[in-house]
Structures are given as structure tokens and as C-alpha cells.
Image (cartoon, rainbow, N blue to C red):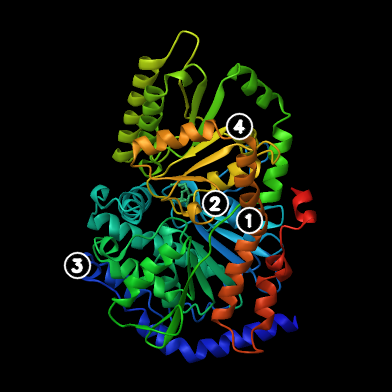
């Protein structure tokens, strides 16, 4: 209780100092677009006032205030999609899900976001579900919101731009307004149950303006943001129309985290040229007296748990079936969401080249490409699916035999456990995105290997993971011959070299696992608000087991794996 009061009163003190600043900042970056579409008026309608604002509700709506526990600080995770575990259903395998769960482990918390459902009764209050000590609070979106916010600005504009594919962006003012509208909707729903000592952590490109919307509603809480996807260089970011309203709004967060130093530096370059932004000390930037810090926090996996899972899965009937189906063939594996950023077309071309120039490998190897469909309403996704299907048909037609299919292609979603067994069975993982924030498949593949007889990772230099997984064969996915040559080298690599490459990567991942990621981010978020001695309770809450960040891949830790 004492901790709760101390943290609460320190935030109020900090808050009082910065109310004026925040009111002023709320206008920074508002664009001509808002004024022309009327969205600006919508914003000012929501600006703090005794009638409508967040100030009166600083203690939250009494009906929902008890979410995630009635006492003490809560960690509020916000992401577009919320993965509510359904009893008996397959566990979702995505990186964001694993990351969020790690953040909520050992912390009192709520995970808030979109249910994944479309429903026109948008005004409904969030539905809450309690599972394994986590409170999930979800809202539905209307069809229009889904189209303009999710399919529209988030995935037809921000996704391609941030993946360096300016050519694919399809900007429209309607989608921009829809994106801002849904961010306001999230802010309204969230604001209703926020308490003054909550710490908020927002995830991914769907929700860049959320902190600004919360500040407009008078929320003074520490708010962090993490971008799971890449951040493109300055000139590319500037191709986003009205970028100041979206990217500029990131300065309302206390801490903005990126996957790699490269992403972080790209954003630093953007901020350095943004009007009204002053460079502070180190990695801090200042807008009208308020500070934002930026940093690189490479996302990771539950390494030890995953390694155990793979060991078990290797003994499962499913893994046995896979091995039997291979009838002695070597297995090369690709696992990606079906997305143009993943370089699947270039990979198939490289496999084609490999078979063309190495006829001795024909009938001795198969490429298993797992590619669950995604975002199918977007034309570029339908196009990539057609292209991949046609290409695979061509390669199979050209080299296949009645007894041998060069490429096995599957769109079905696989559970975490099933995937871990497949990773373990694969001699080579061919992970060659054209651009990827991190690519946790690469990390999972390393964790899933038998350390005594590991497979080889062939990894694109443009995946965030390449900065850490230096034991991989690093390739440029645009150079077909080089990828084909790397595949040949991987398939022929002697055991001692495979071990020599794999060992240090596994050690690295055992230390830099997902818990360490969450702890280091949250510790940094606490630091952004820290005044010596004042916020130590907040730090303690956000980092319940700081000592883990110092752990090494000791024999004990390795044994756990
Ligand atoms: O990694 C980026 C990301 O958008 C995550 O936020 C999400 O979990 C994943 O890709 C899948 O995307 P979607 O929710 O659009 O299917």
C-alpha cells in the first residue's frame, strides 16, 4: 500500500509539472489533413475540459477500475490483436504474443486490444477475460474501422513503408482518418479503466498515436512503445503523407523501443530533422520541455522452454511421421507468414538455382515451405500468394519425379509445439526475408536444435536477427547464386563446424531471452521517469527479477535447456 501511494504521489507530482507541457504538445504535429477532414475538431472535442476530460477520471471508471487486481501498479499492455488463450485451442506462435506474455509474467497486468472480431456495436465496453493471472480486455471493431485502420493505413501504408517498400504503399485520406479514429477509440476505452499508477506499454505500428491521444485525455502515466517491425531510413519515412502526425506522435511516449540499433538510428535521424524536436543528452529528444528516450531492445524467445519443447516434440508421433515421410531426404525449411517482405519468391528462385547447378542434389533434398496466409483482403498479399504458388508449381514440374517432390508447400497454421518438432528435424533453415524487424523463427530454429547434431541456419542480412546470430551463414536474399551456394555449403557442412556455429548462438539466446528483453525494456522505461530515490518502487515493480538480466549461460542455465 505504501509503495502504491508513493508511486501514485510521485506521478501526480511529476504530472502536475507537465500538464501545461502536455496540453501544448498535444497539438504538435497535427496536420492539414485533420483540419480538412474534420478530424481536428474531433480531437479538440476530446481535449481536457472539466466536462469531458480524463482529469475527472484520473482514478478510472469505478465499474472497470479493478481490472487486473485492485491494488498496486499494473502493467497495461496494448496491442492491436490480443491473443486470448482458448481452452483446447492451439497456442499462437507469433513473436508479439510470446513477448507480451513474458512482459506480463510475474507482473499484475492487463492486455488490452482488438478481439479480432468485427461488430458494429462499437460503443460496447471492453469484454474482460481472466486466464492464468492475466486479464484480457478486448473490444470489437466495426467493418469500416477494420477496413480503414487495419487493412488501410496500418497494412497498406505503414507496413510497406516501414519495410522499405514505398512502391507498395496505397495512401488514402479516408484510411488515415480511420487510423486516427481507431487510435482515439482505443484511448477512450483504455482511459476509462486506467489508474494513475498504471504503466502502459503499447506495441507496434497500429498504435503509434495512442500515447498522444492518452495525453490529450490527461493521462500522465509512464507510456512506452515498442516497434516490432523495422524502421526505415529518413527519406523513406518521409514518403508517408502527414508523417508528423503519426511518426511525430511517438514523441509522446516516454520510451520508444526498436528491434535493432539500425532501426533506432533511422528514427533518431528522423527526429533530428523534425520541427520542434531538440536533441537532448544521449538518446533523448525533447519536445516543448518533455523528454522521449529511444533505444534498441532486440526481441527474443523463451529459449530454454523452447529447447525443451523441441526435445520433447522430436519424440512425438507427429515428428515421427515427418521423419518417415522424408524417406532419407535432407530437409530444408522455410517458415513465414505469407508476406512479400519475407522473400519467399527469391528463396524459391534460389532453390531452383541450387537444383539447376547441383544436379547431384536432386532427389536427395526437399524444401518444406510453411506459409500461413495473412491479410488476404490486401491485393499485394493475394498477388504474392499467386506468385509463390505458380513458382513452386514450376519448380516441382521442372525437377520433380514420380517419387520426389522438390518443394512441399503448406499454408496451414502450425502450433508452437508442432513447429518446434519440425525445426528440430530440419537440416537447414532458409530464412531469407527482404526486410524483417527481428524474425523470431531464426531464433526458434537455433533453440530447437540438438546441440550435439545441430542444423545450419542460412539467414538474410536484412533480418534484425542477423545482428545477433553471427554463427549463421549470412546471405543477401537478392543474390540468387549466393543463396544457392550457401544452401549447398549448409547441406555439406561437417559436424564440428555446425557445432562451432550453433553453440555460441544458443548461449547468446539463453542469456538474451524474452524475459531479459521485457526486463531490460521495462527497466529503461522506469528510468525515463526516475528521479533519484523517488521512483524506486516503480523500478522494483517493473523489474521483479532484475538479477536475471545479469545471468550468464552457466552450465545450470544450459542444463535447463
Ligand atoms: O510482427 C508484426 C505483426 O503485425 C504483429 O503485430 C502481429 O502479431 C503479426 O505481425 C501478425 O500480423 P496480423 O495481426 O496483421 O495478422
State the CA–CA distance, disc 1 to disc 4: 22 Å
Residue 79 placement (x, y as % from top left): 50, 57
Mark 3, ligand 1, within 8 Å: the answer is no
* Label 2 vs label 4, nearer the camera: 2
Residue hosting label 1: 508
Q: Earlier in the sequence, mark 3 or mark 1?
A: 3
State the CA–CA distance, disc 3 to disc 1: 51 Å
State the CA–CA distance, disc 2 to disc 4: 20 Å
Identify which residue, 393 or 489, lies in the foreground: 489
State the CA–CA distance, disc 2 to disc 3: 48 Å
Q: SS for tag 2? A: loop
Residue hosting label 3: 36
Residue hosting label 2: 469
Q: Earlier in the sequence, mark 1 or mark 2?
A: 2
Q: SS for tag 4? A: helix
State the CA–CA distance, disc 3 to disc 4: 53 Å
Crowd around label 3: few <14 · some 14–19 · many ≥20 (10 Å): few
Q: Earlier in the sequence, mark 2 or mark 3?
A: 3
Residue hosting label 4: 422
* Label 1 vs label 4, nearer the camera: 1
In the rendered image of this protein, does residue 271 appear above or below residue 483?
below
Identify which residue, 187 or 471, lies in the foreground: 471
Q: In the rendered image, is residue 217 in sight?
A: no
Picture residue at 54% right of the left edge, 51% below the top: 469
In which image quadrant can residue 1 be found? Answer: bottom right
Q: SS for tag 3? A: helix
Amino acid at each position: 500500500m505504501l509503495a502504491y501511494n508513493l508511486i501514485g504521489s510521485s506521478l501526480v507530482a511529476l504530472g502536475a509539472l507537465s500538464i501545461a507541457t502536455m496540453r501544448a504538445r498535444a497539438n504538435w504535429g497535427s496536420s492539414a489533413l485533420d483540419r480538412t477532414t474534420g478530424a481536428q475538431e474531433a480531437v479538440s472535442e476530446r481535449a481536457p475540459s472539466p466536462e469531458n476530460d480524463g482529469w475527472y477520471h484520473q482514478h478510472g471508471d469505478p465499474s472497470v477500475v479493478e481490472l487486473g487486481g485492485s491494488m498496486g501498479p499494473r502493467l497495461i499492455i496494448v496491442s492491436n490483436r490480443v491473443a486470448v488463450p482458448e481452452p483446447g485451442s492451439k497456442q499462437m506462435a507469433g513473436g508479439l504474443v510470446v513477448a507480451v506474455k513474458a512482459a506480463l509474467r510475474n507482473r499484475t497486468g492487463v492486455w488490452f486490444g482488438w478481439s479480432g472480431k468485427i461488430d458494429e456495436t462499437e460503443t460496447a465496453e471492453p469484454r474482460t477475460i481472466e486466464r492464468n493471472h492475466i486479464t484480457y480486455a478486448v473490444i470489437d471493431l466495426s467493418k469500416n474501422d477494420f477496413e480503414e485502420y487495419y487493412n488501410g493505413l496500418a497494412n497498406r501504408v505503414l507496413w510497406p513503408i516501414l519495410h522499405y517498400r514505398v512502391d507498395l504503399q496505397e495512401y488514402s485520406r479516408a484510411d488515415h482518418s480511420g487510423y486516427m479514429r481507431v487510435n482515439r477509440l482505443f484511448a477512450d476505452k483504455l482511459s476509462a479503466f486506467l489508474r494513475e499508477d498504471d504503466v502502459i506499454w503499447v506495441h507496434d505500428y497500429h498504435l503509434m498515436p495512442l500515447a498522444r491521444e492518452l495525453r490529450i485525455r490527461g493521462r500522465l502515466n509512464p507510456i512506452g512503445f515498442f516497434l516490432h517491425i523495422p524502421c526505415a531510413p529518413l527519406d523513406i519515412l518521409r514518403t508517408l503523407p502527414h508523417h508528423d502526425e503519426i511518426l511525430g506522435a511517438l514523441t509522446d511516449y516516454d520510451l520508444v523501443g526498436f528491434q535493432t540499433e539500425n532501426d533506432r538510428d533511422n528514427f533518431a535521424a528522423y527526429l533530428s530533422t523534425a520541427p520542434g524536436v531538440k536533441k537532448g543528452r544521449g538518446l533523448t529528444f525533447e519536445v516543448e520541455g518533455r523528454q522521449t528516450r529511444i533505444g534498441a531492445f532486440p526481441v527474443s524467445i523463451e529459449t530454454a522452454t523452447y529447447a525443451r519443447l523441441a526435445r520433447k516434440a522430436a519424440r512425438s508421433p507427429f515428428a515421427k511421421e515427418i521423419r518417415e515421410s522424408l524417406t532419407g531426404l535432407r530437409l530444408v525449411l522455410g517458415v513465414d507468414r505469407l508476406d512479400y517482405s519475407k522473400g519467399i519468391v527469391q528463396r524459391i528462385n534460389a532453390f531452383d538455382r541450387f537444383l539447376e547447378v547441383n544436379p547431384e542434389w536432386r532427389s536427395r533434398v526437399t524444401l518444406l515451405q510453411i506459409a500461413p496466409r495473412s491479410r488476404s483482403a490486401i491485393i499485394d498479399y493475394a498477388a504474392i500468394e499467386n506468385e509463390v504458388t505458380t513458382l513452386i508449381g514450376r519448380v516441382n514440374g521442372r525437377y520433380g519425379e514420380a517419387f520426389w517432390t522438390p518443394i512441399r508447400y503448406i499454408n496451414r497454421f502450425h502450433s508452437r509445439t508442432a513447429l518446434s518438432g519440425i525445426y528440430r528435424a530440419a537440416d537447414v533453415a532458409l530464412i531469407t526475408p527482404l526486410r524483417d524487424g527481428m524474425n523470431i523463427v531464426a531464433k526458434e530454429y537455433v533453440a530447437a536444435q540438438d546441440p550435439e547434431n545441430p542444423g545450419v541456419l542460412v539467414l538474410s542480412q536484412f533480418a534484425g536477427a542477423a545482428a545477433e546470430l553471427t554463427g549463421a551463414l549470412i546471405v543477401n536474399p537478392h543474390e540468387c547464386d549466393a543463396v544457392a551456394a550457401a544452401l549447398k555449403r549448409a547441406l555439406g557442412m561437417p559436424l564440428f563446424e555446425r557445432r562451432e556455429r550453433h553453440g555460441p548462438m544458443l548461449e547468446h539466446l539463453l542469456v538474451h531471452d524474452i524475459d531479459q528483453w521485457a526486463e531490460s525494456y521495462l527497466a529503461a522505461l522506469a528510468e525515463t521517469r526516475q528521479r533519484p530515490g523517488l521512483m524506486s518502487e516503480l523500478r522494483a515493480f517493473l523489474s521483479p527479477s532484475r538479477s536475471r538480466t545479469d545471468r550468464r549461460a552457466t552450465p545450470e542455465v544450459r542444463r535447463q535447456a
